[in-house]
């Protein structure tokens, strides 16, 4: 038997944090397309059920076309059960206004544990709320003779959380005959041991939406043989996000050298992907980084490109020790101040640029 575990799809996200409106609309539609491709993959590979472990949609904004696209995929694949547990971003019910719910769409609630059985495999889930989070594990009763998959949405932790984030307190679920805990909430793939019998796993999101979601994205394919769950992460995103750190040094004194370093760093990244370059390191005081020029040079190479300057100024205090100019006096004055070195560097950088402007 094969089952897909996915989560945190955040369909219909506005996608406007980095992208212009046209590209944001395209990415919003691509998220829906990737969901559709995953369902097609499931149909072609005889997957019996797709577990959606929370955050199918993103907050309250859901376009009618997005709701209908998801329902359409479910209805067009009656041989696949879609087992959906709401997450903390699923504020709106995408079934509002639907007169007849598809028979192959299975839901959970927050009031009690609900189970769906497929031969010797049982999929059990419950929504975590502020009211039940402290007691949710106490009435979870599983049959040790079955292969048990438990579905939850929350932050895994070894101890009880104190904020409003839904928490899955791992010790509470140990020794309960769980073979695989399908989790949602964390946007990257993560798998670890739960106890001597089972594992817990975050599938991550299907598509990265921002540069805090870099790297491979996809779903987990569960192959279940003789009550044994074998999970495999399947990379599936249409586009990846890359944050590339480019460290500059004293030798990088002009734009051609800096551009060359960036070119080497992003070499091999596919044109269809989204790239953020972060410039770091310590550079000479007279080096000016032309960020607009960098953006213009690389913008057409990728679906999206941005650059951020986090470099620090390289200051040789000794070179100003005997300098009788205003610049030398200024550097010595700042040098002797009891302030953090990073702050000194910034003050000197700004001051020197102002002084050089005066001399001109």
Image (cartoon, rainbow, N blue to C red):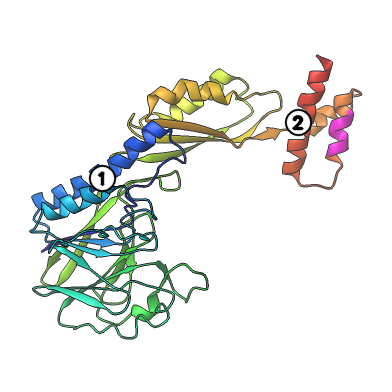
Q: Is residue 262 above or below residue 236?
A: above
Residue marked by disc 2? 350
Residue 123 location, quadrant: bottom left
Q: Residue 255: horizontal and vertical position, in percent?
A: 57, 20
Quadrant where the N terminus sits is bottom left
Label 2 vs 1, first from the N-terminus = 1
Residue at 89% of width from left, 22% of height from top? 325
Judge left or right: residue 178 versus residue 167. left
From the image, give the main secondary structure of the stretch colored magenta.
helix
Residue 236 visible (yes or no): no
Judge left or right: residue 149 versus residue 326. left
The residues tagged by marks 2 and 1 sit, at their Cα atoms, a distance apart of 52 Å
Q: Regarding mark 1 in the picture, which secondary structure is present there? A: helix
Of residue 317 and residue 183, the one placed in the foreground of this image is 183
10 Å neighbourhood of mark 2: few (<14), some, or many (≥20)? Answer: few
Q: Which residues are magenta?
A: 329-334
Farthest residue to the top: give it: 360
| Magenta stretch encompasses residue 177 | no
Judge left or right: residue 342 versus residue 175. right
Residue at 16% of width from left, 50% of height from top? 72
Q: Is residue 217 above or below residue 158?
A: above
Residue marked by disc 1? 65
State if disc 1 and disc 2 touch (CB < 8 Å).
no
Q: Is residue 272 above or below residue 33?
A: above
């Amino acid at each position: 038997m094969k089952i897909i575990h996915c989560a945190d799809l955040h369909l219909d996200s506005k996608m406007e944090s980095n992208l212009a409106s046209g590209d944001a609309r395209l990415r919003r539609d691509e998220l829906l397309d990737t969901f559709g491709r995953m369902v097609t993959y499931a149909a072609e590979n005889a997957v019996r059920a797709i577990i959606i472990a929370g955050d199918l949609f993103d907050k309250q904004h859901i376009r009618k076309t997005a709701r209908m696209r998801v329902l359409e995929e479910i209805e067009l694949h009656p041989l696949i059960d879609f087992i959906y547990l709401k997450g903390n971003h699923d504020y709106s019910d995408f079934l509002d206004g639907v007169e007849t719910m598809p028979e192959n769409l299975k839901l959970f609630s927050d009031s009690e544990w609900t189970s769906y059985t497929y031969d010797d495999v049982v999929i059990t889930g419950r929504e975590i709320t502020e009211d039940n989070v402290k007691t949710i594990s106490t009435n979870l009763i599983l049959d040790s003779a079955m292969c048990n998959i438990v579905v939850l949405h929350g932050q895994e932790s070894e101890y009880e959380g104190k904020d409003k984030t839904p928490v899955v307190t791992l010790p509470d679920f140990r020794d309960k005959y769980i073979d695989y805990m399908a989790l949602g909430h964390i946007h990257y793939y993560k798998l670890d041991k739960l106890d001597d019998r089972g594992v817990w796993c975050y599938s991550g999101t299907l598509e990265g939406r921002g540069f805090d979601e870099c790297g491979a994205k996809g779903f987990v394919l569960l192959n279940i043989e003789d009550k044994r769950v074998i999970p495999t992460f399947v990379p599936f995103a249409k586009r990846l996000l890359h944050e590339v750190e480019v460290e500059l040094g004293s030798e990088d004194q002009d734009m051609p050298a800096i551009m060359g370093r960036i070119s080497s760093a992003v070499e091999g990244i596919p044109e269809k992907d989204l790239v953020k370059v972060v410039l770091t390191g310590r550079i000479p005081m007279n080096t000016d980084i032309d960020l607009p020029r960098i953006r213009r040079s690389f913008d057409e190479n990728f679906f999206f490109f941005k650059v951020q300057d986090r470099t620090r100024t390289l200051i040789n205090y000794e070179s100003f020790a005997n300098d009788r100019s205003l610049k030398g006096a200024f550097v010595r004055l700042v040098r002797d101040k009891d302030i953090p070195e990073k702050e000194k560097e910034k003050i000197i950088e700004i001051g020197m640029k102002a002084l050089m402007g005066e001399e001109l």
